[in-house]
Structures are given as structure tokens and as C-alpha cells.
Amino acid sequence: MEEASQKSWFSRNWMWAVPVGGCGCGCIGIILFFVFGIGAAIFGVSKLIDNATPVEYAMEQVRDNEKVKFLLGDEIEKYGIPSGNISLSNNDGDVDFSIPIRGDKGEGTLIIKGIKSNGEWIYEDLYVRIKETQEEINLLKKEKVLESI
């Protein structure tokens, strides 16, 4: 009588058992943790940027500007990932952002540059660059005046 030797469960299933791990938290678990962790971090930072005072103010100016509405459309929204930086320290800080925006007629980029001094934002540059024509539309209420020194 000859008995046929049968392979063990691990020998038959090692190709998927090793990456998943014995308890289901092997390599795949670690990869998913990092993917969802990075995704959550990006989402959190994006929400923080969206709710920043300079961004809210700038989007309000975009939606109130007739020339921007004529070129991009009435329903203007942010899309994509903003680039730049914002730093805040108590009542002071600075912002230097470019945010992609679009409407039903076209696309553009919202540029925000400013400083925060004693709790109040002062904008150096606030304009929309239209993607198709590269035209820049100033959104500041008062034009900057350069004074000679």
C-alpha cells in the first residue's frame, strides 16, 4: 500500500497567503492603510485651504466680477488642486496661491497674493488669468499705485 503524499494548505496557497498575511493584515493591509491615509491627508488639507479666508474672499470677488462671468460663465467653481502656500502665525501671515477655476464657458486660474497684518488681510495681487487668451482680470477694488521713493 502506497499512500499519496498530499501538499499542505500553505504549500498550495502561499501565493496569496503571504501578501495578505495570516491574519489579513499583511502587505495589502499596509498598502491600503497608506493609500487611505494619504488620501485623507490630501482631503483634509484641501478642505483647510478651501475654508481659508483669502480663498473665500477671492472666490466671492470672482463671482461678483462681470467680466469674469462673461468670459467663464455664471457658475464658476474651483477644480483641481491649488498650488502655493499659506502661512499663519497668530494675527500675521501670508498667502501665495494659484487655484484652477472653471465655468460653463471656459477655464482660468485665480491668483491670490497677500499678507495678514494685525488680523487683517491685505491683498497685493488678486486676479484671474483666462486660460484661452491669457488675459488677466484684476479683482482688487483699488488699483495698486506705485509711489516713487
Image (cartoon, rainbow, N blue to C red):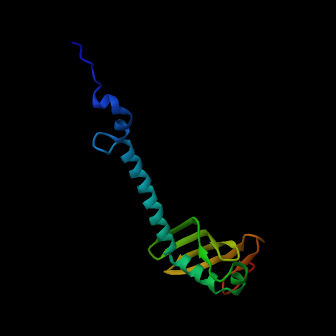
Q: Is residue 118 above or below residue 24?
A: below
Of 100 and 119, which appears nearest the observer?
Answer: 100
- Residue at 63%, 81% (x, y): give it: 62
State the quadrant of the C terminus: bottom right
Of 33 and 58, which appears nearest the observer?
Answer: 33
Identity of the residue furthest to the right in this view? 133
- Residue at 70%, 81% (x, y): give it: 68
- Residue at 63%, 72% (x, y): give it: 101
State the quadrant of the N terminus: top left
Lateral position of residue 19 relative to residue 110, left or right: left
Question: From where the camera sits, is residue 144 visible?
Answer: no
Q: Position of residue 112 (x, y in %)?
A: 62, 73
Q: Is residue 29 above or below residue 46?
A: above
Using the rendered view, name the quadrant where residue 16 is placed: top left
- Residue at 47%, 70% (x, y): give it: 47
Question: From where the camera sits, is residue 81 visible?
Answer: yes
Of 61 and 94, which appears nearest the observer?
Answer: 61
Using the rendered view, name the quadrant where residue 98 is placed: bottom right
Q: Position of residue 103 (x, y in %)?
A: 65, 76
Using the rendered view, name the quadrant where residue 80 is placed: bottom right
